[in-house]
Image: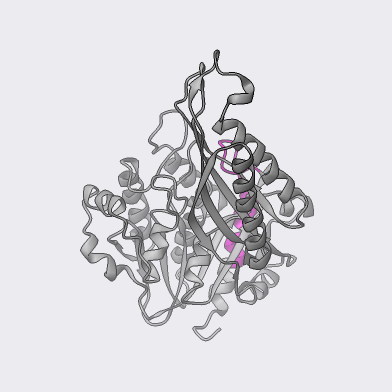
Amino acid sequence: MNGREIIRRCRLLAQHTEEPGCITRTFLSFPMREVQRLVRGWMEDAGMDTRIDAVGNVRGVRGDGPRLMIASHLDTVPNAGAFDGILGVIIAIALAEQKPQCAVEVAAFSEEEGVRFGIPFIGSRALVGSPVMDEEVLAAIREFGLDPAQIPESVLDPEVKAFLEFHIEQGPVLESLGLPVGVVEGIVGLSRWDIRFEGQANHAGTTPMEGRRDALACAAEWIGLVEHVAETTPGLVATVGKIDVRPGAGNVIPGSALVSLDVRHAMDEVRERASNVLLAGAEHIAQRRSLTVATELKLDEPAVALRFEMVEQAVKAAGYAVHRMVSGAGHDAMILAQKIPAAMVFLRSPGGISHHPDESVLEEDVDAALAVGAELLRAWQADN
């Protein structure tokens, strides 16, 4: 496979979706069956012994002895592009197809985005021995025809000594520098919260403004605080991406507003301090407006340092300039880094666009990633 063929296969997988007319493929949804079949077939064509583990990851091994795992994910966000995650899987298969001297394992993770159940990294967490065991997740596994009792068998084989992930950057940095690839030195820490403001639903026409306990107005004021804290804290990004308002009628004052909060920073202490400021702000605003607020931590992932030295020499050997960068997005590499040395290579994202149908990748950049991967496999040893 070359860059053109890899892109073709990514676009082929994009046709398998839950929503006609756009790309949406969540954890163990119906279209995942055909995607698994295609990916498993391509792995076998590349000379790998394959299986689908108990959480739906497609796994392929080529060669014996200590091995390097190369992987990314098959699921998408709603209305996604064709390359987030999937590109890394197909690049991994292409590298295995080149018959490297070292043993390799390719993994196509069934869940990274966390869309279906609000829980990311279901696929990769099973490999490091920290599987998601929520009952709704286990029920979905059973419904798909897999056996949750076999989840312990999904853990990494002791022969897997390191992890590598290729992924689109999902941002504008490499394009601004005119570089096809970048070396990821770390992944930011991430906190996700649900914040519920509770007021009092009432008639929109008969309730005076001074007597209202409007949950949405309270949430809106707090969202302004979120933006302010993020804009005045260097390196911090904070997002409210989802609002559920009840009862949800145009002529009823909102009595309840459930909002999400996503906070990220490369330094855990900065992220934690900002999160505390925002939670305290929610309490203060709610109290002043005579509302109550409840908070629930949904995800807390510390910042992760990656083994950038694993890939820097390969980038140089392939003839490209080395640019180190921090990922503002979470990736499966941050989960695998809990157990084994993990590295990432970013590919340029034209326009900095991702999580959108216009997401794209350049053929020459995919060829560059293949060249970097080939150099890494040529030099890789288990004690690197």
Q: Which of 8 and 143 is in front in this view?
A: 143
Instruction: Determine whether, in the image, residue 151 is placed left or right of residue 310.
Output: left
x, y percentage for residue 287? 60, 43
Question: Which residue sits at x=60%, y=71%?
Answer: 306
x, y percentage for residue 5? 50, 48
Magenta highlight on residue 55: no
Q: Nearer the viewer, residue 114 or 314?
A: 114
Question: Which residue sits at x=21%, y=64%?
Answer: 149
Say above or below: 274 vs 61.
Answer: above
Question: Which residue sits at x=44%, y=60%?
Answer: 93
Quadrant (top left/top right/bottom left/bottom right) for the C terminus: bottom right
Say above or below: 366 vs 288.
Answer: below
Q: Farthest residue to the top: give it.
A: 205
Instruction: Determine whether, in the image, residue 8 is placed left or right of residue 227.
Output: left
Question: Which residue sits at x=55%, y=33%?
Answer: 215
For residue 350, say whether it is visible.
yes
x, y percentage for residue 172? 71, 49
x, y percentage for residue 228? 74, 45
Describe the colour scheme in one phrase. Answer: one colour
Magenta highlight on residue 363: yes
In which quadrant of the rendered view does residue 146 lie?
bottom left
For residue 47, say whether it is visible.
no
Instruction: Determine whether, in the image, residue 142 is placed left or right of residue 191.
Output: left
Q: Which of 196 and 166 is in front in this view?
A: 196
Q: Where are the magenta residues, as a range?
A: 353-372
Instruction: Determine whether, in the image, residue 33 is placed left or right of residue 212.
Output: left
